[in-house]
Amino acid sequence: MKAIVQDVYGSAAALELRDVDTPVPGDNDVLIRVRAAGVEQGVWHLMTGLPYLTRAFFGLKAPRNPIRGREVAGRVEAVGRNVVGFRPGDEVYGTAEGTFAEFVCAKEARIAKKPVSSSFEQAAVVPISATTALQGLRDSGRLQPGQDVLIIGAGGGVGSFAVQLAKALGAQVTGVCSTGKLELVRSIGADHVIDYKHDDFADGARHFDLILDTAGNRPLAVLRRALKPRGTLVIVGGEGGGRWTGGFERSLRASILSLFVGQKLKGLMATERQEDLRFLAQLIDAGSLTPVIDRSYPLGDAPEAIRYMHDGHARGKVVVTV
């Protein structure tokens, strides 16, 4: 099969389209014929090996799995002997290691039936980004109907899902984004939008019950100024920061500071759960959640897809089609 492979950590130039062996499913695995694969920040981190902390989990000198990509949508080709929830022909979506390929093996617990109303491309951009947004708002943020929520990075991959999910959960939503993404953020349901290039959301004019920060570079002091005295800040992922720990250092500082102030300050490392995929599929089929795709690239152009995503200009998500 064809796959996007890298032998060493590095830039997108380290990626190559090659012929490799088709994976064989284990007892608890599902073999998926990939139709589309989402491009998210984790792909860039695994490609570059940055921050260096990630190498402790994915390979010290080189990626343990040389095939990139983690979000997937496609059809089941075969199942392991212990798999009971899926059978060949099922259309599924979820996460796996090495989805920029014609086939990939996924654990049964990390996939679910694809939303009926979604194309493979739309479904492929949901699993990590939408799950992260959901867990940040519902689980870490404890979002309640009627609360005022600020989504920083509202026009990006996680942010575009977060705006819609916060509305579905009954919140009043303010989105922060760049000038070029203002109309997109309005169109997906934000009650208010703030252009961070011209306006300061932390000027004291408004305070929020919950802030979901997907942008990863603002000081905690600035974020706290926009938060209510008993509000909650959730920092998504590990963007920004140095080469060793990246933005995880800011999340750690937030957790420590939270012990001494009335506000709840925390970092989020989302977990991939089948029940969340099922919940998201229900929202999509009900019309409450719509994946936003900026650009689609063929498999051979996956390196360019990663570059475009990491540059931060994407309106919503980027997808690779197979």
Image (cartoon, rainbow, N blue to C red):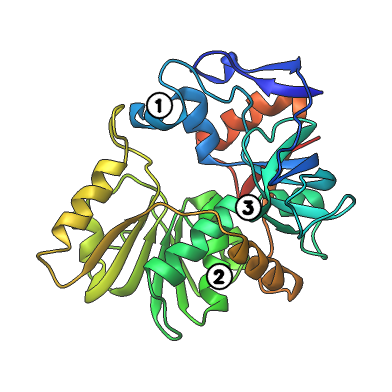
- Give the Cα separation between the discs numbered 1 and 2: 32 Å
Q: Amino acid at mark 2?
A: Leu
Image x and y of residue 307, in percent: 57, 28
Res 291 quadrant in image:
bottom right
Dot in front, 1 or 2: 1
Residue furthest left as drawn: 260
Which residue occupies the foreground of this view, 214 or 18? 18
Around disc 3, counting alpha carbons within 10 Å, would you say few (fewer than 14), some (14 to 19), or many (20 or more)? Answer: many
Q: Is residue 256 left or right of residue 285?
A: left
Q: Is residue 115 left or right of residue 170?
A: right
Q: Amino acid at mark 1?
A: Arg
> Which quadrant of the figure contains the N terminus?
top right
Res 268 quadrant in image:
bottom left
Dot in front, 3 or 2: 3
Image x and y of residue 276, in percent: 59, 65
Residue beneath label 1, please?
A: 55
At x 38% / y 66%, what residue is drawn?
Answer: 140
- Give the Cα separation between the discs numbered 1 and 3: 22 Å
Residue beneath label 3, please?
A: 110
The label on residue 165 is 2
Reply above or below: 114 against 296.
below
- Give the Cα separation between the discs numbered 3 and 2: 21 Å
Q: Is residue 14 visible?
A: yes
Q: Is residue 44 left or right of residue 240?
A: right
Reply above or below: 170 against 322.
below
